[in-house]
Amino acid sequence: MTSLKGGIWDMIIINVKDGESLDKALKRFKKKFEKTGVLRELRSRQAFEKKSITRRHEIKHAIYKQNMNAETV
């Protein structure tokens, strides 16, 4: 189950195709679950972080990504 804005719960549905291995279906489920960001949000809520520190992390991450793009180009 994944939480959506407003406190509504929605289930992740994966249709297993005929002849598809369970490993492939499980891989699709994991990818879909990861996109929802539930685990990321859960980890971020384990300990309170001030907004200034959160902003600092975002800026550091943006600088890192910008440097990575500059190296590849």
Image (spheres, rainbow, N blue to C red):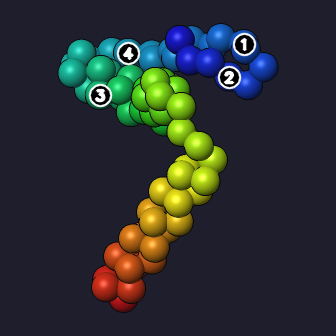
Whether label 2 touches label 1, CB < 8 Å = yes
Q: Position of residue 23 (x, y in %)?
A: 21, 21
Instruction: Tell me which corner region of the image, top left, top right, bottom left or bottom right, holds residue 25.
Output: top left
Q: Residue at x 73, y 25 (%)?
A: 5
In-image side of 16 versus 11 (left or right) = left
Residue corresponding to mark 3: 27
Residue corresponding to mark 1: 8
Q: Earlier in the sequence, mark 4 or mark 2?
A: 2
Element assignment for label 1: loop
Along the line of sight, the residue nearer the viewer: 66 or 54:
54
Mark 4 and mark 1: span between their CA atoms?
A: 25 Å
The crowd level at tag 2 (other Cα within 10 Å; few <14, some 14-19, many 20+) is: few
The crowd level at tag 3 (other Cα within 10 Å; few <14, some 14-19, many 20+) is: few
Mark 4 residue type: Val
Mark 1 residue type: Ile
The crowd level at tag 1 (other Cα within 10 Å; few <14, some 14-19, many 20+) is: few
Mark 1 and mark 3: span between their CA atoms?
A: 25 Å
Residue corresponding to mark 2: 4
Element assignment for label 4: loop
The crowd level at tag 4 (other Cα within 10 Å; few <14, some 14-19, many 20+) is: few
